[in-house]
Image (cartoon, rainbow, N blue to C red):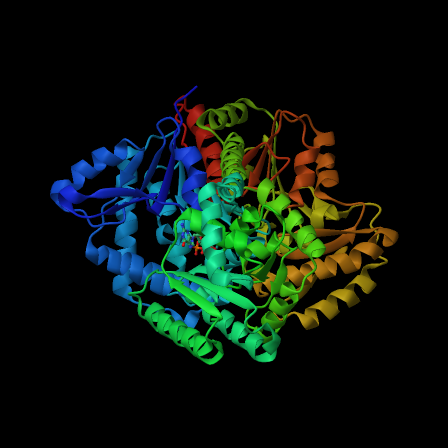
Amino acid sequence: MTNQRTIIISNRLPIKITGKREAMQYQSSEGGLATGLNSVYKQKDNIWIGWPGAIVEDAYKQQVRDKLKEQNLLPVFLTQEEINGFYEGFSNETLWPLFHYFPSYATFNPTNWNLYRTVNEKYAQVILEHIRPDDTIWIHDYQLMLLPGLIRKAMPNISIGYFQHIPFPSYEIFRSLPWREELLNGLLGADLIGFHTYDDVRHFISSVNRITNISGFTNELNVNNRSITVDSFPIGIDYNRYYQLAQEANTYRGELKIKQVTGDSKVLISIDRLDYSKGITHRLEAYRFLLERHPELHGKIVLLHVVVPSRDNVPKYKEMKEEMGKLISDINGKYSTLGWQPIHHFYRSFPPNILSAMYKTADVALVTPMRDGMNLVSKEYVASKTDETGVLILSEMAGAARELSDAVIVNPNNIWDVAEKIYMALNMPVEEQKRRMYAMQNTVKRFDVFNWVNNFMEKLQEVKEQQKALLTHTISKETQEKIHTTYANATRRLILLDYDGTLVPFHKQVNEAIPDAELIDILTQLTKDPANDVVIISGRDYKTLETWLGELPLDFIAEHGAWYKYNAENEWNTAPDLNTNGLPSIMQMMNMYTKRTPGAFIEEKSYSIAWHYRRVEKDLGNLRAQELISDVKHIVGDMGLQVLQGDKVVEVKSMYINKGKAVKRWLDKDNYDFIIAIGDDHTDEDTFKAMPAEAYTIKVGKNISAATYFLNSYKEVRKLLHDLCLDDNTLKQGNKQFALL
Ligand code: GDG
């Protein structure tokens, strides 16, 4: 067993230093995240790295390091300038508003960006000083988006997870960031990227597809030949802790105090950090509307309005605080009586027992953010309702709404509806309250924070193992030497080469993939040896292949096997059983799709039709291709046709032809003692499957494949082929020197 450690990294450590110099004090954070990660960083020699929440003078840094080390914590010290630019500036005035769909609040300041980058580099430096190659790193949140990339660069094989606690916005918002590509590339350094909801996952993948040249249909992305996963991991709370807290004596005492203030009134609570994303002013508007519309509630309800101070030196927060104060004073001013005040406002934080007492006392909890990654207050309320009564009104814009579907779900912008839903909640029969609360408690209990930590860590390990399994397929030095030796010793060789994507790069225009001088040279070298049968096996029409490569002594399989030609013969042959009766009606359908899809075009071959969408806007192309496939799928079977999806192409052809059947002709005609088959797309899988066990099968690009080995691009294929001829000559000269990929 190796001593594998987990290193947690976040902007802030789970403690905060208060006071200066000799008077420094270390206060633990209460947050749910700290509790959840306690189970990780306090174990063995795991560590949590982050900022200790205060500026520490140089002379005291070692003392802080020593003190924190006792608790498995490691500080990253920041200067005032760095806090201003990196934290308050770029993190909170650029990323936070954009990611919460407040683009007009976002500032784009290059100085802040530079400080964001510098601080991420600073974190990387501290990490790299302490990291071991078999450690697992778990980075938290949007302040450190560049960090995965920085660590990956220094340690290519290390295991890195990244979790983002705030939403990932849609591409249309994300694209407005001048530094969007740098941020994505930073995140893509991770092996596992986690968000709270599936929508965040979708948005992230869509931004990656559109902004970088990395693509992926699913939640697996191939980043420089590392397969990484993007997935949703909705965070939970420490359910048992909240449930128990609700039953402590101090909580009961808190409840009694609250009752002294609220009397017989029904109690509503609203608890948030000061933040425009939390929908505080909209909520107050809804409350005002409720009081206006339902005078019968006057004197009978009370709103406990807790706002925890946060970021109030950021201008937008200051503005919001003023607006909030004015609304509260307007409402209280207008509706208060000598014996009743509709809102009790607190701009402060409370100890956990008082918070728990508020949750317990509240008949209705108003959790109506404009956007929230998850929102823990909603889950804490549910866990604290030990008698199962109470109603949670929850914004559909909070990640929590995906799990807590038994809450009363609202759109926070619809303040009139929110007001009516509050009215409904106040009058909800106890039976219904209990039914809903019980269902939500089950969910919150099952998917608690420990479950979240385990799920994330297990998935990260799985991704890492998957990467290793894929690595076994890359061509090692030994395999390469084996290929060369078998080649050199063979007397009859069969070399099967797909064309597009295998020998030449993928072109936007199909007719631009003309063979260049380098390729002609390699094929000339290969075909020079009479022991070699070199077969170009392509989906292209035979005329194009003939025009481009007909001068060389090659064999050909065209149109996936509908046509074939031996070098020794001049004539092209057609395969038997070609069935094309249904193709005209397929053509009609494809024409319809071409009209609806700018950039799409049809390629008509003698025994098949291909619908290309390589020039179509990415998502539209994928959508139309799926539509087309589902339309034709039902009819092709009866026509003796089949539909194939290649790279940016949908092709319909006779059911009885494929590359695998076609290559059988070569396998049957000779006894080859060296066989190699190389291809990049779906249709080459038939070739791979038809190969005898001793053949070398190589897939270009990483995907699940029937091939035994992978190469990364046509360039590596060319190098392999070039080196085969070269080595053979070298071997013949008795000087064995292998050119390595
Ligand atoms: C970010 C994302 C995501 C509040 N008042 C008091 C107090 N609190 C505690 C609550 C809760 C926490 O603060 C607030 O958590 P939220 O999840 O509601 O919101 P953010 O701080 O914005 O958190 C969010 C979260 O990360 C986790 O991934 O859910 O979407 O924005 O735990 O209890 N705690 C104490 N006194 C208070 O007066 N002790």
Q: Quadrant of residue 47?
A: top left
Asked if 99 appears above or below 295 in the picture, the reply is above
Q: Nearer the viewer, residue 507 or 738?
A: 507
Question: Residue 208: x percent and y percent?
Answer: 49, 56
Q: Nearer the viewer, residue 505 or 599?
A: 599
Q: Is residue 626 something that shows in the picture?
A: yes
Q: Indicate left or right for 180 with 408 as reference.
A: left
Question: Residue 153: x percent and y percent?
Answer: 34, 42
Asked if 190 appears above or below 586 in the picture, the reply is above
Q: Indicate left or right for 644 with 466 as reference.
A: right
Q: Is residue 223 something that shows in the picture?
A: no
Q: Quadrant of residue 569?
A: top right
Asked if 721 appears above or below 86 in the picture, the reply is above
Which residue is rendered at x = 43% and y = 19% of the image? 1
Q: Nearer the viewer, residue 106 or 543?
A: 106
Q: Residue furthest right?
A: 638
Q: Residue furthest top?
A: 1
Looking at the image, how many numbered discs can be counted on the residues?
A: 0
Which residue is rendered at x = 48% and y = 76% of the image? 337
Q: Nearer the viewer, residue 61 or 507?
A: 61
Q: Quadrant of the C terminus?
A: top left
Which residue is rendered at x = 29% and y = 56% of the image? 116
Question: Residue 194: x percent and y percent?
Answer: 49, 47
Q: Indicate left or right for 19 with 300 as reference.
A: left
Question: Residue 41: x percent and y percent?
Answer: 38, 34
Q: Quadrant of residue 8?
A: top left
Q: Residue furthest left?
A: 59
